[in-house]
Amino acid sequence: MSLRAIPDSMDPTVVGSIDRELDRVELDHRVSIRLAIESGSRAWGFPSPDSDYDCRFVYVATLETYLSPWRTRDVVETPLTDLLDVNGWDLAKALRLLVQGNAVLIEWLMSPIVYRGDPLFRDRLRALADEVADRDRVARHYLHLGAKQWELFERTGSLKKVFYALRPAMALHWLRERPGAAVAPMHLPTLLRQCELPAELSAAVTELTDLKSRTREMGSGSAPAPISAFIAAEFACAEEIFVKSRVQDLTRARAITAEFFRSEALAG
């Protein structure tokens, strides 16, 4: 049984194009796509009427590819169109970045929109992420991502950038409330539901999200005060709480991920 979770709000014609593109990738590149999800604003929970589609996938190549001395690219990129952005990572690349603290694979694993995938593979990979992801490094990833977007907002006034800063800030808040966790939801409404937040902040986020869902171009303006204060406070707090640099022994994490990779590569 393959995973499939597509909201009714998504254009079935575009979804069909994505399905065909994924089929073509498997055929042309001789890979097995183990998980394909939506990673953009639609999956984050704040799409605009004209939001494009950002499909990301994790694939496993043939055993022949992995045993060859001639290295191949560990990324598959398809031609970018006005509406579609479809590309993916080899499982080995995804695992290396996970161990290094990159939160992108975690985001993909937590996406509520799934085009296709092996449910057992996703469950095993989620469990692996829970075991090896370093919460300090993951948090610093969110901090860097969010601070960069907030800086762009302050420079341009683009209200769209507020969302790109708010979601990492909310993920940081979620992590702070759960000291033992490293894998936060990617979906902004889920983060809102699972966090203890002031009523005025939740109301401001809901209002701004509703505006984005109705507006093709939000334009420029000032961020609502509760949102601005929340973002600034979370980034400042994260800077203090989540350790920036420390010596880390990755031997165990590398061994665990290597065993996972070997089992999936041998499975074909």
Image (cartoon, grey):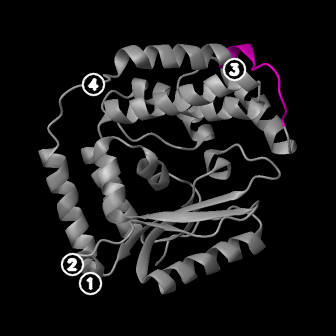
Q: Local crowd at mark 3 within 10 Å, few (<14), some, or many (≥20)?
A: some
Three-letter amino acid code at the position of disc 3: Glu
Disc 2 from disc 1: Cα separation: 5 Å
Q: Which residue is mark 1?
A: 64
- In the image, is residue 100 part of the stretch drawn in magenta? no
| In the rendered image, the vertical position of residue 166 relative to residue 125, given as above or below | above
Q: Report the side of 18 relative to 119 (left or right).
A: right
Name the chief secondary structure element in magenta. Answer: loop
Q: Report the side of 128 relative to 166 (left or right).
A: left
Query: Contact, CB < 8 Å: mark 2 with mark 1?
Result: yes
Q: Which element carries disc 3, helix, strand or loop?
A: helix
Q: Which residue is mark 2?
A: 67
Q: Which numbered disc flags the more N-terminal residue, 4 or 2?
A: 2
Question: What label does residue 154 carry, if any?
Answer: 3
Q: Which residue is mark 4?
A: 245
* Picture quadrant of residue 163: top right
* Picture quadrant of residue 224: top right
Q: Which numbered disc flags the more N-terminal residue, 3 or 1?
A: 1
Q: Position of residue 198 (x, y in %)?
A: 62, 17
Three-letter amino acid code at the position of disc 4: Ser
Disc 4 from disc 2: Cα separation: 35 Å
The structure residue drawn at horizontal position 83% and vertical position 51%, both measured from the top left corner, is 49
Q: Which numbered disc flags the more N-terminal residue, 2 or 3?
A: 2
Q: Which element carries disc 4, helix, strand or loop?
A: loop
Write the start and end of the magenta stretch as one range.
218-227
- In the image, is residue 222 part of the stretch drawn in magenta? yes
Disc 1 from disc 4: Cα separation: 39 Å
